Image (tube, helix red, strand yellow):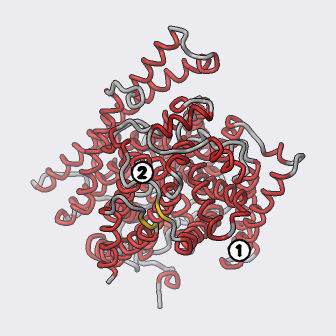
């Protein structure tokens, strides 16, 4: 019955043309597909392919040190893992990809997650847990050999820097000149530290008490944000430019990387999960009550690559733009970074790895609905930059209406007033339009008099959603750099050695902080520069993770099951290589990095740029060229790793020597009460 209902819902979404389709079909299709995938495919992989063993001691138990390796309640681990992986991708990606229409992105979210993203997350978590929670790059070095492994170490660390920078950019854009969001997000830090101390020293093991305390304080922080926003005296303390917020975000990332995981990272991510799940559940309830029609066409004319939000054709850029909601390499870093250091029992790998990704995919479906229930004209007015549609509101609405999506200046002014904003034109990045869509749904279902409250609540929700990924990502980046340096200097590889912790954390924050700075000073909002690079890098990282997993499966005499990682790997190689080639060679200035750099250089030399753009043009030219170099570097590393994986697999199948499996020998768990279930 579930399968038939799901098939009917997917057919309705895919085949419907010429008349509105109800958003309930999206929710129905998603829930049915997720149920089938988790109940059968995930269970089969866990039992037959991975053979998880609930009697085996995990690294958290064997290597417990009170800082990074800590056996943790599985629900807290699930909360931390979900909060860490669920960054801007499932929110911003579907929103931006809606310029192609609702159909392409929705199908990719549903099937990409069940067959690709969830499998990658679960398998990577399992492999890292069996290898003392080693990072993805270190596993590649151990299992593939020095050449491919070193390339994977360098690639994963470099890609990680780009990913964190984009996370920071999205959260800065969401909080910029929004005292309400800035105060609420800031308040989550001391609240999380209080909860961490409460669970560790005041009421040990009382998870429900600590959770209740944290949730109450979070709700008070949301309410307090409105008080701050309405106070002429207090709002100036939290009303900041993007660059100021960027420095504060860097400082927070450094603190999250060096403090004990129980003090800030785990409780903050755990509490953020309540906010995330609560909001998504509320949004789903509102959609069920309201049953809104999706107003965006199934497919728009912008599939030809002329889209106003970002350049590029439907293939491959819909698969690059929507990363975290379908398949994301960043998840492999979390699944081989912080999560296996907290996992108490292998039996929870399916729930945390596969189930956590399913939940994120559902968030992406909610984001797609929230973006596409808006009038298309409003959607494009919010997400199109001034450089595309014009600085003046009159010019913008004329341009957008000429595309066949009518919108008026008065309509946008009324909407901005309802949301408590001065203007909603050219609020690029995806977060503002998603907040407008969510606020519209909440307002229609629960009271339109509270639209401003709902809008700022959604902005705060997005900022918290993203910032939790940034802090976990910085910590994982620290682990990765320690792994790399530990190959040359053993002491630097010790995750608890303070000099190594301080040095590597500072290096990681400095590197991603530079790219964050690039995005903040970009007059186009930074999205055009960083988001395509983010998508390509993220999917290449997923390909690297699947390379490592496929190689280990073959070496483990499970070659007949290698298709579970090999099939999504082949697809990712195709789309990332195609996208990278287009970003390097395209003559379209909205697609090609080098084309954009050359065009900007010519305009600067001819004196055609206004003074404000001319001042930052040299930096933007350099950054476009840097993006091109980084993209080429990533492609070369990816193919090197792929060929090395194939080489290792062929040698194994021919009976020739290959690097030995580094799985830690079985030892029985002593935490019986943690894994025996009723």
The quarter holding residue 351 reads bottom left
Q: Which residue is drawn at 57% across and 57% down?
A: 437
615 left or right of 533 in image: right
Residue 192 visible to the viewer: yes
Q: Can you identify the residue that label 1 sits on?
A: 210
Image location (x, y in percent) of residue 474: 56, 48
In the foreground, 443 or 531: 443
The image's mark for residue 322 is: 2
Residue 147 visible to the viewer: no
Residue at the far left in the pictured view: 654
Q: Residue at x 52, y 81 (%)?
A: 674
* Local SS, label 2: loop
In the foreground, 121 or 166: 166
Q: How far apart are marks 1 and 2 (CA)?
A: 35 Å
Q: How crowded is mark 2: few (under 14 residues within 10 Å), some or many (20 or more)?
A: many
Question: Which circle's residue, 1 or 2, is located before the other in the chain?
Answer: 1
The quarter holding residue 594 reads top left
Image location (x, y in percent) of residue 556: 23, 63
In the foreground, 57 or 574: 574
Image location (x, y in percent) of residue 254: 64, 45
Q: In this view, does 655 lie above or below 207?
A: above
Q: Which residue is drawn at 75% across and 57% down?
A: 187
Image location (x, y in percent) of residue 92: 51, 50
Residue at the far bottom in the pictured view: 678
């Amino acid at each position: 019955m579930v399968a038939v209902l799901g098939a009917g819902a997917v057919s309705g979404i895919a085949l419907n043309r010429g008349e509105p389709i109800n958003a309930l079909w999206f929710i129905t299709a998603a829930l049915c597909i997720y149920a089938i995938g988790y109940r059968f495919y995930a269970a089969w992989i866990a039992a037959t392919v991975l053979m998880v063993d609930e009697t085996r001691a995990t690294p958290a138990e064997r290597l417990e040190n009170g800082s990074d390796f800590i056996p943790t309640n599985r629900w807290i681990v699930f909360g931390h893992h979900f909060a860490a992986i669920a960054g801007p991708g499932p929110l911003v990606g579907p929103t931006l990809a809606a310029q192609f229409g609702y159909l392409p992105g929705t199908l990719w979210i549903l099937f990409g997650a069940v067959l690709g993203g969830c499998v990658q997350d679960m398998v990577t978590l399992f492999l890292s847990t069996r290898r003392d929670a080693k990072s993805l790059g270190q596993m590649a070095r151990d299992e593939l050999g020095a050449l491919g492994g070193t390339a994977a170490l360098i690639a994963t660390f470099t890609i990680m820097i780009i990913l964190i920078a984009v996370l920071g950019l999205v959260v800065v854009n969401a909080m910029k000149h929004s005292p309400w969001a800035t105060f609420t997000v800031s308040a989550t830090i001391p609240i999380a530290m209080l909860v961490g101390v409460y669970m560790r020293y005041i009421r040990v093991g009382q998870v429900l008490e600590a959770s209740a305390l944290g949730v109450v304080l979070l709700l008070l922080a949301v309410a307090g944000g409105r008080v701050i926003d309405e106070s002429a005296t207090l709002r100036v303390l939290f009303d900041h430019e993007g660059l100021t917020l960027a420095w504060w975000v860097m400082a927070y990332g450094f603190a999250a990387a060096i403090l004990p995981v129980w003090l800030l990272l785990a409780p903050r991510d755990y509490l953020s999960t309540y906010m995330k799940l609560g909001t998504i559940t509320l949004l789903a309830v509102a959609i069920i009550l309201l049953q809104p029609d999706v107003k965006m066409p199934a497919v728009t004319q912008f599939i030809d690559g002329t889209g106003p939000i970002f350049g590029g054709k439907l293939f491959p850029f819909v698969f690059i733009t929507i990363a975290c909601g379908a398949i994301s390499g960043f998840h492999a870093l979390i699944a081989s970074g912080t999560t296996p250091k907290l996992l108490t029992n292998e039996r929870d790998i399916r729930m945390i790895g596969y189930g956590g990704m399913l939940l994120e995919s559902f968030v992406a479906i909610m984001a797609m609905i929230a973006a596409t229930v808006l009038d298309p004209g409003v959607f494009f007015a919010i997400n199109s930059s001034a450089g595309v549609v014009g600085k003046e509101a009159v010019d913008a609405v004329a341009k957008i209406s000429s595309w066949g999506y009518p919108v008026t200046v008065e309509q946008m002014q009324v909407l901005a007033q309802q949301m408590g904003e001065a203007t909603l034109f050219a609020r690029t990045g995806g977060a503002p339009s998603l907040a407008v869509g969510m606020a519209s749904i909440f307002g229609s279902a629960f009271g339109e008099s509270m639209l401003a409250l709902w809008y700022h609540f959604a902005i705060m929700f997005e900022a918290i959603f993203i910032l939790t990924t940034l802090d976990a990502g910085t910590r994982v980046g620290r682990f990765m750099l320690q792994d790399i340096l530990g190959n040359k200097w053993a002491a630097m590889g010790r995750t608890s050695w303070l000099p190594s912790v301080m040095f590597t954390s500072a290096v990681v924050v400095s590197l991603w902080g530079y790219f964050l700075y690039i995005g903040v000073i970009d007059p186009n909002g930074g999205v055009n520069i960083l988001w395509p690079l983010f998508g390509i890098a993220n999917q290449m990282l997923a390909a690297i993770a699947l390379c490592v997993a496929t190689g280990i499966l073959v070496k483990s005499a499970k070659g007949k099951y290698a298709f579970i990682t090999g099939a999504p790997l082949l697809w990712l190689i195709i789309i990332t290589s195609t996208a990278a080639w287009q970003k390097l060679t395209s003559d379209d200035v909205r697609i090609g990095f080098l084309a954009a750099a050359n065009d900007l250089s010519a305009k600067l030399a001819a004196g055609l740029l206004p003074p404000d753009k001319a001042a930052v043009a040299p930096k933007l030219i350099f950054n476009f060229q840097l993006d091109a170099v980084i993209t080429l570097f990533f492609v070369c590393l990816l193919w090197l790793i792929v060929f090395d994986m194939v080489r290792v697999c062929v040698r194994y199948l021919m009976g020739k020597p290959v690097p030995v499996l580094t799985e830690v020998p079985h030892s029985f768990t002593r935490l019986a009460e943690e894994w025996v279930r009723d």
